[in-house]
Amino acid sequence: MKNLWILSLLTLLVFSACKKDDEELPDDETRVTLSYDGDNQTAPILGADTYDFALRFPASQMATYAGRKLEEVKFYILDKPAECEVRIFDAGTVDNHGAELYSADVISAVSSSSWNSHVLTTPLELTGDDIWVVVRTKHEGNIASIGCDNGPAKDGGDWIYAGIGTSWLTFRTFTGTENVNWNIRAYLADE
């Protein structure tokens, strides 16, 4: 009988602990998150060059958020690049961004093998048009900078621009084989 009582008490404690954890959601789970990725799995090794890794959120997705403010960008870095910027662009075409809305050099705050966060100095009010969220890195040799998930790639989740004179491509097109989404996430301010 004593064992049954102890088992009942342990069961009650387990369920109580789980309920409490569920009520205390991390901050990221209470805000609107714009992303295409899953958990970080790896990062592609790319040679010496400057790379823009981007997410494109089309107007069909963004109309719901017109009037809301984009306040933070998080991204996973495996190997710290020589330079790193967070950039936000307005609507352009289906395969190229429009005007630059925001840019910040964030290299001094970037850590390797971790999620990095940049809070915009001035939150951007969303219009409901397309928006491009970009992390630009400069590689001085072969490194794996921006993180990615396991895929499969989602439309808008794997844009890359590499070097001068090239054009925006999906990473699937760029490599011919890879099927991933960048570990880049944009967060909207609470209403």
Image (tube, rainbow, N blue to C red):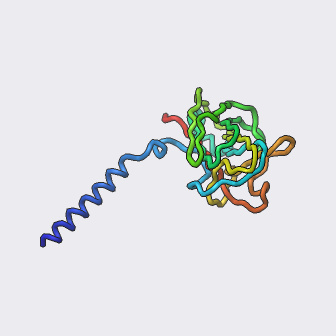
Identify which residue is drawn at 70% across, 35% down.
89
Does residue 69 lie above or below 4 as drawn?
above
Q: Nearer the viewer, residue 83 or 128?
A: 83
For residue 53, which quarter of the picture? top right
The answer to whether residue 68 of the structure is visible from this angle is no
Q: Nearer the viewer, residue 190 or 87?
A: 87
Q: Nearer the viewer, residue 17 or 146?
A: 146
Does residue 123 lie above or below 22 as drawn?
above
Residue closest to the far front: 141
Question: Along the horizontal axis of the image, is 61 left or right of 93?
Answer: left
x%, y% of residue 67?
58, 32
Question: Along the horizontal axis of the image, is 22 left or right of 177?
Answer: left
Identify which residue is drawn at 87% across, 42% down.
165
Q: Nearer the viewer, residue 156 or 111?
A: 111
The answer to whether residue 44 of the structure is visible from this angle is yes
Does residue 159 lie above or below 8 as drawn?
above
Question: Along the horizontal axis of the image, is 160 left or right of 62?
Answer: right
x%, y% of residue 74?
58, 42
Residue closest to the far left: 1
x%, y% of residue 34?
59, 44
Residue closest to the far bottom: 1
